[in-house]
Image (cartoon, helix red, strand yellow):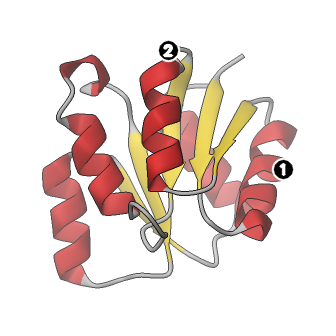
Amino acid sequence: MKRVLVVDDSATVRQQVGHALREAGYEVAEAVDGLDGAEKIDTDRTLAMVICDVTMPRLNGLEMLERVKRDPAHAALPIVMLTTEGQPALIERAKKAGAKAWIIKPFKADLLVAAVKKIAGA
């Protein structure tokens, strides 16, 4: 079973994303902000993919993405940004840092699951 880490400071969003992914047969881990997410990525070698918010305390999603991708051990780990932000400069920064996709909230569960299947595999 593929394991997906959901990094978001909103418990509601973690719950919604987690529910959609579990229904589709994925195992879900959660992190409450970018710092928590980076630490979990460093210690959990079973992750197939990460879904990450942008606007969070302590370490935002873009900072987490850049930090994680600097480590060659995580170069191949797909990270998808899931956010209310739609600014082209932020999207460009995320792409340059190695984000696989940028999904705008509110999201449709079936489209999110389809993206995860495409990126992480079934």
Residue 30 against residue 14 in the figure, above or below: above
| Residue 102 on image: x %, y % | 39, 63
Does dot 1 land on a helix, a strand or a loop?
A: helix
> Which residue is pictured at 43% across the width and 51% down the height?
80
Judging by the rendered image, the residue that carries numbered circle 1 is: 19
Residue 99 seen from this side? no
Does dot 2 land on a helix, a strand or a loop?
A: loop
Closer to us: 4 or 102: 4
| Residue 117 on image: x %, y % | 58, 36
| Residue 29 on image: x %, y % | 69, 36
Name the quadrant containing residue 3.
Answer: top right
Quadrant containing the N terminus in the rendered view: top right
Q: Which mark is residue 106?
A: none
Name the quadrant containing residue 61.
Answer: bottom left
- Give me the C-alpha separation between circle 1 and circle 2: 22 Å
Closer to us: 25 or 72: 72
Badge 2: how crowded within 10 Å, few (<14), some, or many (20+)?
A: few
> Which residue is pictured at 79% across the width and 68% down the height?
12
Could you tell me the amino acid type at mark 1? Answer: His
